[in-house]
Amino acid sequence: MSRVLQRAILGLFHPYTTGFEDFRMFKLVPLLTVFAALAQAQSAPADKLAALEAAVQSAQSAGDNAWMLTSAALVLMMTGPGLALFYGGLVRRKNVLGTMMQSFIMMALITVLWAFVGYSLAFGGSGPLIGDLRYAFLNNVGGAPNSDYAPTIPQQTFMVYQLMFAIITPALITGAFAERMKFSAMLLFMTLWSLIVYFPMAHMVWGKGGLLNAFLGGRFPCFDFAGGTVVHITSGVSALMCALYLGRRKGYPAEPMKPHNLTLSFIGACLLWVGWFGFNAGSALGSGALASSAFVATHFGAAAAAIGWLLAEWMHNGKPSVLGGISGCVAGLVAITPASGFVKPMPALLIGLAAGLACYSMVAIIKAKMGYDDSLDAFGVHGVGGTLGAVLTGVFATNEVNNALKDSAGRPLPLGLVDGNAGQIVNQVIGCAISWILAIAVTLIILKVCDLTLGLRVAPDEEVQGLDLTMHGEEAYNLEA
Amino acid sequence: MKKVEAIIQPFKLEDVKEALKALGVDGMTVTEVRGHGRQKGHKEVYRGKEYTVDLLPKVKVELVIPAARSAEVIRTLAEAARTGRIGDGKIFVYDVAEAIRIRNDDRGEAAL
């Protein structure tokens, strides 16, 4: 009986037997599958229910997977072209290609590293400090979900989405040593840095059993929705170590080192803003209400921080600059990153405003007094904004936004200070401290290793000529050509 | 013969050209230059770091004219280039020993 019904339904809409247009037919296919499944299961209600459940699950998986693949693409767009343009515009004309290449090459180098061992070291196993090698060479990473992390999307989607974070994090560091580091040494540095800083840190915060994982059995539950500690503190603090170890650029601060093209930086920063929706809202690992909440918090944080930076600059210098506005929005995006899946819109505005003011003070006032040359302010924006955001997450995180933590009776647990859990701030500070210490210690060791083997810094005459010509044999602007 | 060398604001070049053309001055040489006078440039600030830009873009107009017309030409040029604000530029006037048209070896004012 059910066979007959199924054939009848399929026959009615079959493209070769009816006059329906092909495109209408395609839309009907999923519907028909459901009908067919139902028809087949008519005899037993239990079978019918199972078929319905499977159909619902497949629909959710389709929706979540669509958003997660889109998010992965958005996060890749943050590195190239986003960060490459943002940083490229800020350096001098002779270094723009070298600077863009330092971001771009991460898209290639880290991808290979991730495929070989990176994904597995970050998300394989359940150790407190680092994963294992069960997914090395992407063994067993396929279409089936990894239920520990993202039960509604293929593990391949989860893997490639997390890869985009592993790409942009080392690319952020390049801002600190812009205009003076050897390309070969940078490749070695970034490979070692990913292996010893990023993969362990990603595991500690997001990996099952990780020391700081708040949801999967961590010793110190630290809330970091999209990477305040993993991405921004590690990259920002390592950036400071690079700036201190390498020393200032030749001629700094006496010689003028103005940004050579702020229109490039403007486009890059706006691409970062848009891409960040994939970074933060995508970290919901699905397309439900939590993703919407993170999307809104992200946007509000960026807006308030742009205003904060501009106001500070306007009062301090007399003019609100374009570079100030775009730097402010990036600072806000950094600070809201750990908080984005835990806070409501009004606290997001507050976190953004605080980041705009704090990062402006760091970059425009304190840095000059300290005298180090963090060329493009990777520490001032990512280190400072990331730490501020991580701590404020402990203040404003609320179970009204994120109720994933529940007690034994199934009631949502209080998250941050606003929920009455003041102790969370301590956990956040512990999370920050571990990222700071790991970043400082390991970065200094790796820098020493690279310096002794390849030499970190280009020769003085190469620095004068610029990285474009000396490292890559080309120039960005051949206006006479 | 006099040589008039005027350093003016770039955006005033069209006005100066028009005024000199109306006066019947036939030739001139124009160069894009950078420089400063008493104004000493301006200040730019990038993320709190200040840069003083002391060499500003200007345009240099050079022309050689019969001495009898120099007062009139200089007055016209100055009026056309003037905004009344700092940075309008300067005019220098020199005596010219000789002028030669390369094509046919005309000499003196006939070569202008």
Image: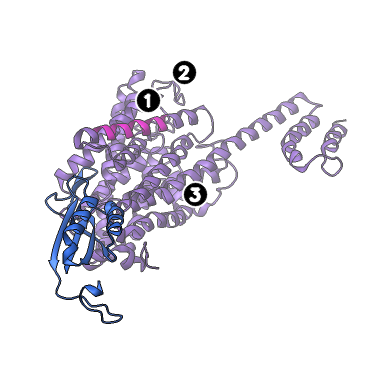
Chain colours: A purple, B blue
- Name, please, the residue furthest toward the front: B68
**Residue at 41 percent of width and 55 percent of height:** A104
Q: Nearer the viewer, residue A112 or A129?
A: A112
Please state which amino acid type lies under the numbered disc 1. Answer: Ala
Residue B63 x, y percent position in the rendering: 22, 65
A285 over B80 or under it: above or below? above
Q: Disc 1 vs disc 2: Cβ atoms closer than 8 Å?
A: no
At a point 32% along the width and 44% down the height, the residue shown is A234
- Do pointers 1 and 2 mark residues of a single chain? yes
Chain of the residue that carries numbered disc 1 in the rendered image? A
Q: CA distance from mark 1 to mark 2?
A: 16 Å
Between disc 3 and disc 1, whose residue precedes? Answer: 3
Q: Amino acid at mark 2?
A: Arg
Residue sitting at 38 percent across and 34 percent down?
A218
**For this rendering, which residue is in front, B62 or B27?**
B27
Is residue A305 one of those drawn in magenta?
Answer: yes
Asked if marks 3 and 1 touch (Cβ < 8 Å), the reply is no
Give x and y (percent) for residue A262: 33, 48
Image quarter (top left, top right, bottom left or bottom right) of the N terminus of chain A: top right
Residue where numbered disc 3 is placed: A134
Q: Which residues are magenta?
A: A297-312
* Residue bearing mark 1: A397
Q: Is residue A390 visible?
A: no
Find out whether residue A235 is within the magenta segment.
no
Q: Which residue is mark 2?
A: A411
Which element type, helix, strand or loop, lies under badge 1?
Answer: loop
